[in-house]
Amino acid sequence: MEQYLLDVARDALLTVIKVTSPVLLIGLVVGLIVSIFQATTQIHEQSLHFVPKILAMIIALLLLGSWMLTTMKEFTLRMYDNMLRFIGL
């Protein structure tokens, strides 16, 4: 039973990492590019930093949203399938 709970927790964490990492990595890369651009041109405006990053993350969510939902749906279905095993029936 303890091993099962550890497997469920590991599966949940891996699913969270798998779903969130593409959007976070895109935000990180765009933020890095904008920061390098700001450092080279010496333009230090706050909106120049946030607007491209937010737009890139919204586009990433639009493009990857169906994959993210499918991944979360598969995890939820695995949890429902194993629910009887968890409660001991």
Image: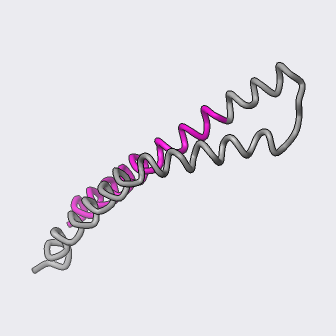
- Asked whether 26 or 16 is in front, the reply is 26
- Displayed quadrant of residue 75: bottom left
Please identify the quadrant where the C terminus is shown.
bottom left
In the rendered structure, which segment of residues is drawn in magenta? 1-30
Residue at point 21% right, 63% down? 78
- Displayed quadrant of residue 13: bottom left
Residue 2 at x, y percent in the picture: 25, 64
Residue at point 56% right, 50% down? 58
Position of residue 35 relative to residue 2, above or below, is above
Position of residue 71 relative to residue 56, above or below, is below
Residue 84 at x, y percent in the picture: 14, 76
Residue at point 63% right, 46% down? 55
Residue at point 36% right, 54% down? 66
Position of residue 48 relative to residue 39, above or below, is below
Residue found farthest to the left: 89
Magenta stretch mostly in which secondary structure?
helix
